[in-house]
Image (cartoon, helix red, strand yellow):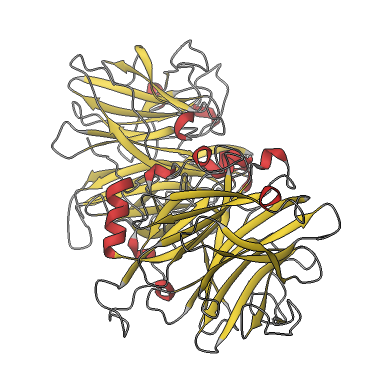
């Protein structure tokens, strides 16, 4: 078998220097205290199952690995009055012995003016948390019985008072607080209750929410970051002290600064809808990480700052599977704390590539002794990508982005302009000489031909798995090669070398499945061998063929895998059949469905696969794409926001493929 496929964790090579750990332990700390990673605590969406506390880890502040497979680490129904929580803020205590977390007690299904309180949480190990739910109208019935929302609480230590302060925005329906303003309360020593009535802290003259306060030793000031509903974007105010001095009017201690944080002081505000700002020291303690939620686009954006006066855009988070964070905060943690979190909730694996990619095709190269994944570039409207990406790995764990290896929009492919879809590749050994590597790589793909106004299949050739690839100059498969009487598209190509005969075959088709033997030039098919191989019958619930044929050979049997239903559907899944010949006929398996969605795990649209056989072993894995959960839940074009995953594929003693359990 000449082709294979792979998996891994997110590559550490994408680490951002701005957030990386300094090689030297900062002055005044011990190696035991040194911060080596970030813990991100967040929620994931506007429904009860998503209004939960989740954790993720990062070594660089940008690429995050899910904990607990992206599922909640603390169940909201066990801690909150509404049984839902949002906006978690986490803080390490001044003595370093405890962790405090505060969250909004809110179920958004009840409306945006329906929550009345918050939850206080305390932990000594980041694993076990005590909790106390606070209902403001109940606790303060005389003055605050008409509170309609209590949003985004956060905690800071007030050295002047010698206590921890929780600050949050309040709104009432009785005129006492006619728009959202930021108030504060002190917390008791056990971090289980508030002391005294809410006190006014700050507002911008209109609804002011999502406050975050940090103390900057460099300028000796407190910096308050917040969202103004009237002005938009993230704004900032500064003060010499948290609370007003004796005789000073409440709120007057703060001086509002001009400009928006997102694009720097004095720059226009970020045109995107943003909220949930969080500010945190970098791991070396020398700069600041500034992050905020681009909540309409489904990702976080990170900035950096040396002085909290000017801000530099760094990058958006690479959302991966269930890592689609909403309004959270990050906390630098030690190696021991990181190890403890991993021991409790484990690392995540899937998806294996950063960003949005689909239709994964894999190859093991005998030339380089490396593995390669080739993919459709996803994340563009209407599946409108025009280039292909390739990732390489030597150990199945660390993956390197080798870049865009073919672009059908420019001069590389003169007969096509876009819709670069569903590639496949095969390695063929050839004569070696001074100018040859001894191998050729034939990369097949589908793209849109503007002359015929149809999708057609082409081929580009290289002597190295990452190229450069040179297009053969013409389509290999056009509508004319479609078996008579069939309808559909000439896409989703697969290439296969028959280990019994050494012959090469091509398979393709959306709406139908065709197969043919390739000529020796590998860029044309033997017309007389073209055959309709479409598996007959079935429904969308089981094995009705749609697209994406893929062929493997094992112990005398040819296995044909294909995808069922539409690529944008939750139900998109994989079925299979077998044959004794490379061109069929195909016999549908007794239990044909081998990979399908698992809604309980928030896994949807699992299909369009390739298969890995570990070299020299009867050990197999299926590589496939599935829909990004955040885009699926928000219906933000989920069918064009797909990600590549891998899971184990097993056979029983009779050679039947067992159902694959998709995992995180």
Q: Relative to 637, does residue 620 appear above or below in the rendering?
A: above
Quick check: 140 above or below 252? above
Return the x and y of residue 607 as percentages of the image width and height.
Answer: 44, 32
Q: Nearer the viewer, residue 614 or 128?
A: 128
Camera sees residue 177: yes
The extreme right residue here reads 175
Q: Quadrant of the N terminus?
A: top left
- Residue 411: image x %, image y %? 52, 59
Q: Using residue 71 as the reference point, say whether residue 631 is left or right of it.
A: right
Left or right of 237? Residue 395 is left
In-image side of 227 versus 514 (left or right):
right
Q: In which quarter of the image is the C terminus?
A: top left
Residue 287, position as x, y percentages in the image: 46, 80
Counting the numbered discs, the total is: 0
Q: Which residue is drawn at 81% across and 70% down?
A: 205
**Image x and y of residue 457, in percent:** 48, 39
**Quarter assignment of residue 500:** top left
Q: Work out whether residue 282 or residue 105 is closer to the camera in this orientation and state it.
A: 105
x 31%, y 84%: residue? 28
Name the residue: 63% across, 43% down.
Answer: 46
Can residue 465 be seen? no
Considering every residue shown, the one lying at the far bottom of the view is 219
- Residue closest to the far left: 616
Front in this rendered view, residue 336 or 123? 123
Task: State whether residue 483 is above or below residue 377.
Answer: above
């Amino acid at each position: 078998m000449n082709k294979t496929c792979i998996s891994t964790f997110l590559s550490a090579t994408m680490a951002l220097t701005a957030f990386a750990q300094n090689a030297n332990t900062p002055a005044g700390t011990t190696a035991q205290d040194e911060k080596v990673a970030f813990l991100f605590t967040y929620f994931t969406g506007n429904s009860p199952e998503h209004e939960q506390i989740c954790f993720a880890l990062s070594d660089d502040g940008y690429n995050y690995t899910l904990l607990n497979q992206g599922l909640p680490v603390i169940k909201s129904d066990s801690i909150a009055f509404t049984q839902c929580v949002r906006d978690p803020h986490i803080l390490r205590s001044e003595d370093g012995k405890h962790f405090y977390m505060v969250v909004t007690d809110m179920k958004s299904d009840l409306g945006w003016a329906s929550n009345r309180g918050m939850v206080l949480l305390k932990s000594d190990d980041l694993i076990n948390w005590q909790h106390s739910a606070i209902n403001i109208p109940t606790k303060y019935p005389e003055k605050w019985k008409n509170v309609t929302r209590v949003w985004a609480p956060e905690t800071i230590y007030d050295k002047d008072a010698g206590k921890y302060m929780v600050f949050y925005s309040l709104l009432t329906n009785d005129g006492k607080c006619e728009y959202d303003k930021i108030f504060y309360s002190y917390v008791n020593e056990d971090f289980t209750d508030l002391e005294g009535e809410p006190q006014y802290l700050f507002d911008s003259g209109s609804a002011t929410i999502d406050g975050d306060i940090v103390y900057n030793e460099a300028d000796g000031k407190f910096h308050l970051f917040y969202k103004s509903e009237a002005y938009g974007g993230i704004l900032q105010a500064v003060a010499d002290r948290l609370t007003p001095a004796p005789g000073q009017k409440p709120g007057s201690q703060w001086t509002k600064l001009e400009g928006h944080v997102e694009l720097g002081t004095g720059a226009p505000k970020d045109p995107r809808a943003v909220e949930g700002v969080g500010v945190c020291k970098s791991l070396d303690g020398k700069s600041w990480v500034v992050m905020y939620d681009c909540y309409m686009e489904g990702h976080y954006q990170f900035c950096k700052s040396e002085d909290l006066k000017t801000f530099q855009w760094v990058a958006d988070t690479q959302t991966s599977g269930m890592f689609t964070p909403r309004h959270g905060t990050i906390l630098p943690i030690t190696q021991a704390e990181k190890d403890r979190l991993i021991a409790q909730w484990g690392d995540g694996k899937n998806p294996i590539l950063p960003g949005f990619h689909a239709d994964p095709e894999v190859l093991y190269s005998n030339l380089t002794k490396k593995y390669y994944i080739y993919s459709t570039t996803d994340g563009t409207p209407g599946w409108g990508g025009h280039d292909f990406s390739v990732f390489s790995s030597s150990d199945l764990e660390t993956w390197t982005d080798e870049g865009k290896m073919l672009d059908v929009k420019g001069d590389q492919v003169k007969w096509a302009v876009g819709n670069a879809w569903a590639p496949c590749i095969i390695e063929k050994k050839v004569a070696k000489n001074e100018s040859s590597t001894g191998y050729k790589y034939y990369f097949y793909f589908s793209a849109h031909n503007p002359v015929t106004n149809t999708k057609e299949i082409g081929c580009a050739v290289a002597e190295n798995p990452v190229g450069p690839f040179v297009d053969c100059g013409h389509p290999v498969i056009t509508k004319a090669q479609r078996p008579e009487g069939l309808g559909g598209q000439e896409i989703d190509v697969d290439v296969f070398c028959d280990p019994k005969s050494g012959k090469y075959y091509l398979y393709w088709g959306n709406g139908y499945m065709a197969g043919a033997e390739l000529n020796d030039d590998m860029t044309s098919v033997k017309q007389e061998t073209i055959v309709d191989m479409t598996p007959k019958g079935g429904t969308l619930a089981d094995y009705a063929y749609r697209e994406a044929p893929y062929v493997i050979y094992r112990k005398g049997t040819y296995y044909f895998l294909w995808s069922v239903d539409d690529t944008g559907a939750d139900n998109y899944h994989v079925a299979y059949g077998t044959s004794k010949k490379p061109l069929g006929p195909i016999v549908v398996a007794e239990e044909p469905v081998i990979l399908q969605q698992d809604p309980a795990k928030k896994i949807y649209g699992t299909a369009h696969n390739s298969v890995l056989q570990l070299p020299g072993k009867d050990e197999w894995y299926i590589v496939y794409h599935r829909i990004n959960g955040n885009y699926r839940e928000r219906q933000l074009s989920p069918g064009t926001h797909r990600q590549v995953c891998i899971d184990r594929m097993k056979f029983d003693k009779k050679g039947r493929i067992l159902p694959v359990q998709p995992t995180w």
